[in-house]
Amino acid sequence: MKYYIIAGEASGDLHGSNLMKGLYAEDPQANIRFWGGDLMARVYSDNQSPAASGADGGLVRHYREGAIMGFWEVFTHAGKLLGNVRRCKDDILSWRPDVVILIDYPGFNFRIAEFAHKKGFRTFYYIAPKVWASRESRIRKLKAYVDKLYIVFPFEVQYFKDHGIEAEYSGNPLVDSIDGSAAMNETREDFLKRNGLEDRPYIALLAGSRKGEISTMMPVLTKFAAQMKKIPEYRDYMFIIAGAPARTMADYAGFLEKADSAYGQTGIRILFGETLSIVRHAEAAVVNSGTASLEAVLLGTPQVVGYICNGLTYLIAKHIIKIKHISLGNLIVDRTAFRELIQDECNAENLVDEVRRLIGDNAYRMKMLDEYAAIRKALGGSGASRAVAASMIKELTKDRTDSKTD
């Protein structure tokens, strides 16, 4: 069968790559065409069969060319967004897939859902838009344009049921991603040696995957590192930035140069392609909110979440977002398992205070790790991606059978 998958950012690329592995396992003749990133492209390359060769599958557009988040950011990039929507619609019509699979990224994917449904394509949504957080009116679109909804958080089951949608939950695919990663199967010594790092404690810094997130978080993170280095017990600590997928040193270099000019040598290192290992072996992590914060939970590294967005976006969000937490781990247990510093609270001084507590207060640290265990338990076991793939194929096979019967 022909599968058209659309993922618009780094987390979607991760989940899309795992879903593709499941689709190839359940349907060895699968032909997949997609919008995504390097992870999805790698899975596609590793799973080409003679039947799929020359069938026009593969990467259509990389998410780094269009990832946009926030009300103001979407407004200012409207022309680019709409251009990508048109290109995607034309490509779907030309390729004629058996199903269009949308992964999160609602600003773009709802437009495609409506189009695909009206053109008669089967439409699945994997990783539901966070309508429980804001813009609940989108539920109407899910009902109208999506044939089947697949969700990845246990609390979503009842929520969507209460709103008339029978969503399917098979666990969270991040569990498989983390447990099967190289980071969980290597020693700290191996990680340090592979990257030419000294055997010193370090703090992981994750500034986000989008350019906008990097530009707002990097000045705060570099100032935080400089202040930590002034404290005697942390003078020998390293600070390692996990370079985001699809980003390069050019996205960070200017901020590091400014920091060294303003504060002296901060000793900040940046590594690419090592995010999970960086987080796992760190004493603590400062994490921009998103999938990375849930990864830190599953990796078992104490964290503080920091998030800053455009001022106008923040003012709008304050009036429409209904949830108490912005981090997935906290949302899953519906309490503060780890601290979130948002907007003005996300400053170097507050980060220093919280990270010192994470490292130096053993009781505080252990309580957080106990909360991590509760979050992992709530997510369920392994095999989520393959289970979702099997369900999708079953739905499509049933459709074909029903069509022949009619």
Image: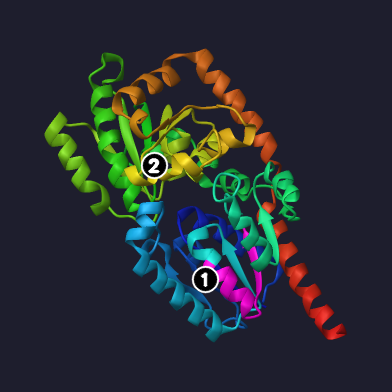
Q: Which residue is mark 2?
A: 314
Cβ atoms under marks 2 and 1 closer than 8 Å: no
Callout 2 crowding tier (Cα within 10 Å): few <14, some 14–19, many ≥20: some
Residue at horizontal 57 percent and vertical 19 percent from the top: 367
Q: Nearer the viewer, residue 376 or 400?
A: 400
Magenta part of the protein: which range? 111-126
Q: Give the spatial CA distance, label 2 vs label 1.
A: 32 Å
**Picture coordinates of residue 355, whole percent (x, y):** 39, 23
Q: Residue furthest right?
A: 405
Residue at horizontal 36 percent and vertical 59 percent from the top: 75
**Picture coordinates of residue 50, whole percent (x, y):** 60, 82
**Picture coordinates of residue 181, whole percent (x, y):** 54, 47
Q: Is residue 72 magenta?
A: no
Query: In this rendering, is residue 174 above or below 55?
Result: above
Q: Please, what is the three-letter code of the amino acid marked with disc 1?
A: Phe
Query: In the drawing, does residue 238 fall left or right of residue 50?
Result: left
Query: In the drawing, does residue 302 fall left or right of residue 217?
Result: right
Callout 1 crowding tier (Cα within 10 Å): few <14, some 14–19, many ≥20: many
Location of the C terminus (image quadrant) = bottom right
Q: Nearer the viewer, residue 193 or 348?
A: 348
Nearer the camera: disc 2 or disc 1: 2
Q: Please, what is the three-letter code of the amino acid marked with disc 2?
A: Tyr
Regarding residue 31, the answer to whether it shows in the image is no
User: For residue 123, which quarter of the picture?
Assistant: bottom right
Query: In this rendering, is residue 216 above or below 149?
Result: above
**Picture coordinates of residue 229, whole percent (x, y):** 25, 23
- Mark with earlier residue (2, 1): 1
Secondary-structure class at tag 1: strand
Residue at horizontal 35 percent and vertical 69 percent from the top: 79
Q: Which residue is mark 1?
A: 34
Secondary-structure class at tag 2: helix
